[in-house]
Image (cartoon, grey):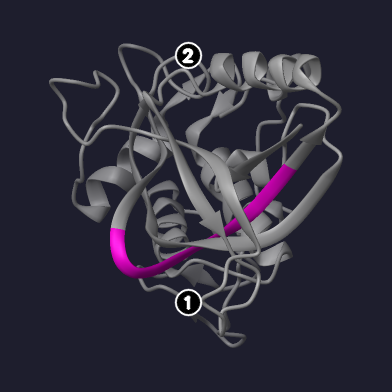
Amino acid sequence: MVLWVFGYGSLVWNPGFDFDEKVIGFIRDYKRVFDLACIDHRGTPEHPARTLTLEPKEGSICWGAAFCIRGGPERERVAMEYLERRECEYDQKTIVNFYKDENSMEPTLTGVLVFTSTFDKSLNKYYLGPAPLEDMASQIATASGPCGNNRDYLFRLEKALFDIGHEDDMVIELANEVRKVLGMVVGKGMIMKDTKKKAVGPMAAHLPFMSFISGIQVHPLAETAVAMDS
């Protein structure tokens, strides 16, 4: 038996379970949105964090990683039990096709599992819905929980997508807005503006993951907490 799971958020950099193979690729007709509340990892019930879910959008592609678990039902059961605890805010499991080649409509893998959520607040108490960019940035900049703060989740995602060579403009724009809220200063005389990929100063350039540059304060995650991060 073979189980494939698609990760589009923290699973990309921190799967947290035993797997046999990791493949970089994408799914079609979905986009990332920061519309899901997290109250037990990087937020609290009083001040929920904003984390990712997927929103259907025809023509979109969402890059991430597919993880393969082989070896029979027991290994599959262990992985799924872990994922269901970790992804407890997601109330749906969706089966998707997975692709590696943007120029081909033939999927590399079929029957891939991905955790998603219902876009209805009456059916899913964790669904926050969309909000203006400034409001989302303010919430992400200030929320924190047992696994760390919300902004590190966003900055780690930004870095993970950069590392696999498939950055997401929405993620970059939101991360830069969070930096604006925090008043982060990068280098001498350079601060991020509220644009997707621009900085002001003598070395204006796209800086994809400023939270990982020396001089920026990032709270490290406890080793035991990382395994349950979502």
**Is residue 38 on the magenta stretch?**
no
Check if mark 2's residue and mark 1's residue have beta carbons within 8 Å: no
Q: Locate residue 171 relative to residue 103 in the image: left or right.
A: left
Residue denoted by label 1: 197
Q: Secondary structure at mark 1?
A: loop
- Please provide percent x and percent y for residue 181: 37, 49
Which mark sits nearer the N-terminus, 2 or 1? 2
Mark 1, residues whose alpha carbon is within 10 Å: few (<14), some, or many (≥20)? Answer: some
**Is residue 61 on the magenta stretch?**
yes
Residues rendered magenta in the picture: 57-67
- Please provide percent x and percent y for residue 215: 71, 52
Q: Is residue 196 visible?
A: yes
Q: Secondary structure at mark 2?
A: loop
- Please provide percent x and percent y for residue 91: 36, 23
Identify residue type, mark 2.
Asp
Q: In the depicted view, which residue is nearer to us: 230 or 43?
A: 230
Residue in the picture at 23% in, 45% down: 135
- Please provide percent x and percent y for residue 159: 66, 57
Identify residue type, mark 1.
Lys
Using the image, determine if residue 174 lies above or below residue 94.
below
Q: Locate residue 67 relative to residue 171 in the image: left or right.
A: right
Residue in the picture at 33% in, 19% down: 47
Q: In the depicted view, which residue is nearer to us: 147 or 189?
A: 147
Q: In the depicted view, which residue is nearer to us: 200 or 145?
A: 145
Which quadrant of the figure contains the N terminus?
top right
Residue in the picture at 16% in, 26% down: 121
Q: Nearer the viewer, mark 2 or mark 1?
A: 2
Residue in the picture at 44% in, 61% down: 176
Distance from Cα at disc 2 to Cα at disc 1: 32 Å
Residue denoted by label 2: 40
Q: Is residue 217 visible?
A: no
